[in-house]
């Protein structure tokens, strides 16, 4: 029974993703050409911002780990 439940949940999740993609596609298609380009530009800039933030966090993370280890050694 649990395997059937798992398969059903996966099927429902995939169907939900398909419906969401179709809605997004239709919304972009309904925008006037200028707004379509603006939406793409905003989305691409937001994606670039997330990449930059992720890169900065990766640089900070090793330093915070070293600090925690050095503090553990002092106790």
Image: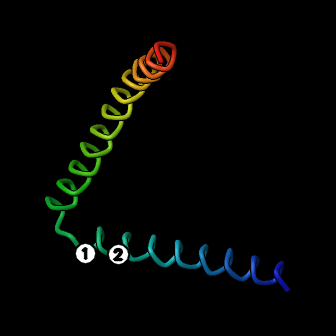
Residue position for label 1: 30
Q: Is residue 12 left or right of residue 26?
A: right
Q: Which mark is residue 9?
A: none
Verify CB contact (< 8 Å) between mark 1 and mark 2: yes
Label 2, secondary structure: give it: helix
- Which one is in front, 53 or 14? 53
Image vertical order of residue 3 relative to residue 75, above or below: below
Q: Residue placed farthest to the front in the image?
A: 75
- Which one is in front, 65 or 61? 65
- Which one is in front, 19 or 68? 68
Residue position for label 2: 26
Q: Is residue 14 left or right of residue 73?
A: right
Q: Residue at x 58, y 79 (%)?
A: 15
Q: Residue at x 27, y 51 (%)?
A: 43
Give the x, y percent position of residue 27: 29, 74
Give the x, y percent position of residue 6: 75, 77
Give the x, y percent position of residue 67: 41, 18
Q: Is residue 7 left or right of residue 60?
A: right
Question: Mark 1 to mark 2: distance in Å?
Answer: 6 Å
Q: Residue at x 35, y 75 (%)?
A: 26
Disc 1 residue crowd, few under 14, some 14–19, many 20+, Cα 10 Å: few
- Which one is in front, 6 or 23? 6
Disc 2 residue crowd, few under 14, some 14–19, many 20+, Cα 10 Å: few
Q: Quadrant of the N terminus?
A: bottom right
Image quadrant in which you'd find residue 4:
bottom right
Q: Residue placed farthest to the bottom in the image?
A: 1
Image vertical order of residue 16 relative to residue 39, above or below: below
Give the x, y percent position of residue 35: 15, 61
């Amino acid at each position: 029974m649990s395997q059937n439940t798992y398969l059903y949940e996966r099927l429902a999740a995939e169907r939900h993703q398909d419906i969401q993609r179709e809605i997004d596609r239709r919304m972009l298609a309904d925008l006037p050409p200028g707004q379509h380009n603006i939406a793409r530009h905003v989305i691409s800039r937001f994606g670039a911002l997330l990449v930059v933030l992720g890169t900065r966090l990766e640089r900070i993370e090793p330093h915070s780990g070293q600090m925690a280890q050095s503090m553990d050694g002092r106790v």
